[in-house]
Image: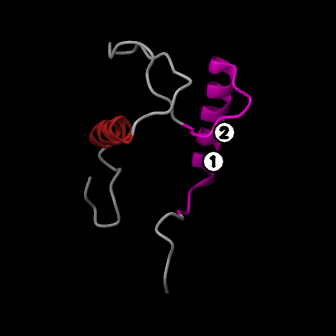
Amino acid sequence: MFRNPHTLSILRELIGVIQEQKRYITDTLSLEKFEYLFRPNEGTECKGAFTPSPKNMTAYAFSRYLNKLAERHKNICDAFGKL
């Protein structure tokens, strides 16, 4: 059976997290409509200091953040068990 590689099954728990992120972006940036769930950091990369920016995150930055998240939480990997 062929599966679309862009279609993922997710847990209900994750749906809640995604909705919370949407609310955060909407409230923090005062944006009613936005295309992307994750936004780049407006400020410097100081630990704990994150100010979302209304511009789009680059693919490089997005993959870097995902890799950091996967390293921190060792249970995040692809279908082959790799980071």
* Residue type (three-letter) at the residue carrying disc 1: Ile
Magenta stretch: dominant secondary structure? helix
79 within the magenta span: no
**Residue interval drawn in magenta:** 8-37
Question: What residue is rendered at 28% in x and 66% in y?
Answer: 80
Q: Which residue bears the numbered disc 2?
A: 19
Q: Which residue bears the numbered disc 1?
A: 15
Q: Looking at the picture, how far across and down is residue 52, in whole percent?
A: 51, 21
Q: Looking at the picture, how far across and down is residue 37, in whole percent?
A: 57, 38
Q: Looking at the picture, how far across and down is residue 21, in whole percent?
A: 60, 33
Mark on residue 27? none
Colour scheme: secondary structure
Q: Looking at the picture, how far across and down is residue 45, in whole percent?
A: 32, 17
Give the SS element for disc 2.
Answer: helix
Which residue is more in the foreground, 39 or 16?
A: 39
Q: Residues within 10 Å of mark 1 (few under 14, many from 20)?
A: few
Q: Kindly indicate the quadrant of the structure image that contains residue 16.
A: top right
- Residue 69 relative to residue 19: left or right: left
32 within the magenta span: yes
Question: What residue is rendered at 49% in x and 82% in y?
Answer: 2
Question: What residue is rendered at 52% in x and 27% in y?
Answer: 55
Q: Kindly indicate the quadrant of the structure image that contains residue 69.
A: top left
Circle 1/circle 2 CB separation < 8 Å: yes
Which residue is more in the foreground, 12 or 32?
A: 32
Q: Looking at the image, which residue sits at the far right? A: 32
Q: For the residues marked 1 and 2, what is the alpha-carbon distance in whole angstroms?
A: 6 Å
Q: Residues within 10 Å of mark 2 (few under 14, many from 20)?
A: few
79 over 74 or under it: above or below: below
* Residue type (three-letter) at the residue carrying disc 2: Gln
